[in-house]
Image: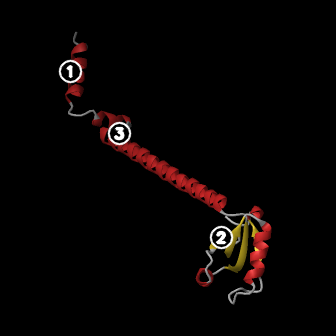
Amino acid sequence: MKKIFPLLVGIMLLGSLNSCDWVRSKLGMPTSKELREKQEQLIKDSLEKVEAEKEAARLEQLRLDSLEQIEAQKKALKRYHVVLGSFIMDNNAARMLQSIEKEGYTPVKISFKNGYSVISAYQTDVLHDAYNRMYKMFALDITPYDVWVYDTKQNLHF
């Protein structure tokens, strides 16, 4: 009994300590503050990961939407276009659009994959109509010498 008494007193003293953090720190274990900080960091990291995944999904949806829009525009195009100009500068293309509209046509700007934009003054699904219109356009003052017919089946455009 004499040997158990000091052991019981020691256990009571350890139990009466205000915090387990002291014991944990002496044993090399993380304290409650360190555990709380680690838990907060894990929550913060998981929230950042969720936000990054949401942003990636949003960007992917935007990409898919733009691809769908491009495909819809491709399908809306007629097959043959009488092209009056090819431009790398948008302001030159805009000037050509305005001059063609003054002549009573409804021009279409088509963006090519190589960075150029072409201005189509006339669109049709019949090849001989496109060539007939091209020859008639040579009489216009705005028509350059390099008028040509573009077939959308060539897939040079977006």
Q: Is residue 117 above or below residue 62?
A: below
27 to the left or right of 107: left
Circle 2 residues within 10 Å: few <14, some 14–19, many ≥20: some
The amino acid pointed to by label 2 is Ser
- Disc 3 or 2, which lies upstream in sequence? 3
Image quadrant where one finds the C terminus:
bottom right
Determine which residue is flagged by label 1.
9
- Give yes or no for contact between labels 1 and 3 (Cβ–Cβ under 8 Å): no
User: Residue 143, how many percent across, how many down?
Assistant: 71, 85
User: Residue 81, how many percent across, how many down?
Assistant: 72, 70
Q: CA distance from mark 3 to mark 2?
A: 58 Å
- Give yes or no for contact between labels 1 and 2 (Cβ–Cβ under 8 Å): no
Q: Is residue 60 above or below residue 124?
A: above
Q: CA distance from mark 1 to mark 2?
A: 89 Å
Circle 1 residues within 10 Å: few <14, some 14–19, many ≥20: few
- Disc 1 or 2, which lies upstream in sequence? 1
Determine which residue is flagged by label 2.
111
Task: Assign a secondary structure to mark 2.
Answer: strand
Depth order, front residue of 147/41: 147
Select label 1 or label 3 by which is in front.
3
Q: Residue at x 76, y 65 (%)?
A: 126
- Give yes or no for contact between labels 3 and 2 (Cβ–Cβ under 8 Å): no
Residue 116 visible? The answer is: no
78 to the left or right of 29: right
Select label 3 or label 2 by which is in front.
2
The amino acid pointed to by label 3 is Leu
Residue 35 is marked as: 3
Task: Assign a secondary structure to mark 3.
Answer: helix
Depth order, front residue of 85/114: 85
Task: Assign a secondary structure to mark 1.
Answer: helix
37 to the left or right of 12: right
The amino acid pointed to by label 1 is Val
